[in-house]
Amino acid sequence: MEIKYQKSKGLTDKPLSYCPGCTHGIIHKLVAESLEELGVLDHTVGVASVGCSVFSYEFFNCDMIQCPHGRAAAVATGIKRTHPEDIVFTYQGDGDLASIGIAETIHAANRGENITIIFVNNAVYGMTGGQMAPTSLIGQKTTTSPMGRDAHMHGNPIHISEMFSQIEGVSYLERCSVHNPRQVRNAKNAIKKAFSYQKEGRGFTMIEILSTCPVNWGKTPQDALKWVEDEMTKVFPLKVFKDAGVESHE
Amino acid sequence: MPKGKLTFDYEHCKGCGLCVTFCPVHILYQDKNAMNSQGYNLIRITDEDKCIACATCALMCPDSIITVEVRK
Amino acid sequence: MANKVLMKGNEAIALAAVKGGVEAYFGYPITPQNEVSEYLSKYMFEQGRVFLQAESEVAAINMVYGAAASGKRVMTSSSSPGIALKQEGISYLAGSELPAVIVSVMRGGPGLGGIQPSQADYYQATRGGGNGDYHTIVFAPESIQETVDVMKESFDIADYYRNPVMILVDGLIGQMMEAVDFNKPTTKRFLPPKDWAAGGMNTHNGRNTVCSLYLDPYELERHNLKLQKKYQAAIQNETRFELVNMDDPDYVIVAYGTMARVVRSAIEILAKKKLNVGMIRPISVWPFPKAPFKNISRNCKGILVCEMSLGQMVDDVRIVNNGALPVSFFGRAGGIVPEPEEVVEAIMHFESRRVD
């Protein structure tokens, strides 16, 4: 019988540590499948940032480097500059990238570093128990915004993809989601395209993916996906922000 | 219409139920009285003949539990 | 005749790094070490090696981390406040067992402080400003020649121990010019291949990961004990010091770097005053040299510690001395380089106080 779908060779045998229904798992598959299908696993180096996805250094079936909170883009720069032939990617959450690591990420983009950033936006700090993140929505209750995020006190949700679309060094930038099969397939294409652009040396690529945090949102996995669709996409519209290349690729 | 055959890596399933939710032909359910060693209910199929091998269940599974094969 | 080159300290550090086989440099502008980056920005480009000015010292040390984790010889340089920003990165380098060289060109502190030479970062360098039980192997040369020699060796030492190595100098050594011989031979070490490096699975077998995360406390303790073994080995093999006039001194002065050079002049002045004063000059400040304190001659009347700070190395001296001899301290802060006469006065004061 022909296999229609199976676990990607871009993932190790280590069971994922994520909570039931957390879409980190889906996003991991899309990254792993993309690397596998592009045939680059043997010369890929991934950078695992600090957050729930810190354990990704055990899940991706390529060399992985775990780095300090917020510094993945700088660490990836250090790797890529000394290993230009390697495919280098970071896997970061919104706390890691949009808060403590925003400077490193902006400057990697501004230098047009030929790396791919997988930016998982679930509007909270998951690992540490559901605190407010720079991407938390207005009114969103978290363990550090118990009365709901308030624009005057906490500022508004930060729009990373919109900001990065202004940076010349960026060659491909899309905000996706995984809240239903169609979005998952689209996110896969976006991630694979980002890695392809890196392979072609086009410069900085980043895919922002809206993701869920059922436990810290206090929702079932299904309701969490619904919340992404109904609430998050209103604040974080899904679209291609930048596509420097027009020629086709395989 | 192709027919699908599903295999579940039951031990690593976390019972999130996304496969059940997104199966377009609604043939999956969580067996309330069967659990893996972590205490998560096992996913069962009502009628495998109705499976159209679309692999949406596997696509939405965060933990790569489901392998889908196409029966000719 | 050795062919010597008259060169500014910072630039000599840069050229020595190239001779030491550095493959990548990541830095950030900060006085008084800017010439290290400026020199390398041209030289590394010409050599086809990697040079990048980062957006901050925090980014720079993390770029170092990335290059080191993927198996390259890498360094950075900075000064006091910049080194403060790098502390977390240095702790990660130690925790992940990664080789890297960090040049610290000390200036007056705290806070923005000043840009004059200082030794007020002795604690920062030797106690490690980062988190966890780790050490950085720290050398504190006193001249540009000695800085060049230890700089050339530093990458081998870092690779050998898979640990960060720091070259601790001050703004004076960085800014002055001296004649330097770049071809003095350095000790060769057997360095195993970096089969642990995460530079892509096509460069080794299996899958390599570099990580400092150990959630299981027993595993983390085992990991720490493993690091401690390395540090014990470094204490055995990398401790370096110089003894000056230490046969039968009336007093012993302990000083390193630029301060030690001032003390050399003071010793000559004191000799004319019929006071026989010796010096213990630590070259490695971590590991701190203990042995020379064990065999100070019986009739030594006391130890004077001199630093261009308000007293930090004096703690290490007190620990090693363990009450055997009276210990006194002389130091200037703010970036002031003391005059030899001030050291002479401190000894005379020590002498007078002891008599009455």
Image: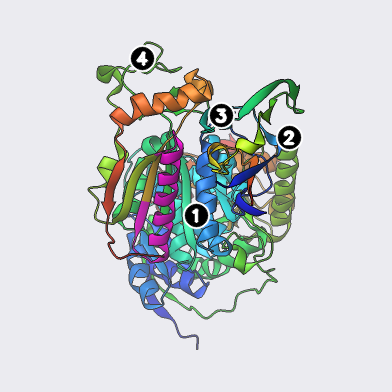
Mark 4 vs mark 3, foreground winner is: 3
Task: Check residue A148 in the rendering and tell me which mark sits there, or answer none.
Answer: 4
* Front-most of residues A69 and C106: A69
Mark 1 vs mark 3, foreground winner is: 3
Mark 4 vs mark 1, foreground winner is: 1
Mark 3 vs mark 2, foreground winner is: 3
Q: Which residue is mark 1?
A: A34
Mark 4–mark 1 contact, CB under 8 Å? no
Is residue C207 found inside the magenta-colored segment of the image? Answer: no
Q: Name above or below for residue C148 compared with residue A188.
A: below
Q: Which residue is mark 3?
A: B26
Q: CA distance from mark 2 to mark 4?
A: 38 Å
For residue C303, say whether it is visible: yes
Q: Name above or below for residue C218 compared with residue C266.
A: above
Mark 2 vs mark 4, foreground winner is: 2
Are labels 2 and 1 on one chain? no
Q: CA distance from mark 2 to mark 1?
A: 26 Å
Badge 1: how crowded within 10 Å, few (<14), some, or many (20+)?
Answer: many
Give the structural element (helix, strand or loop) at label 2.
helix
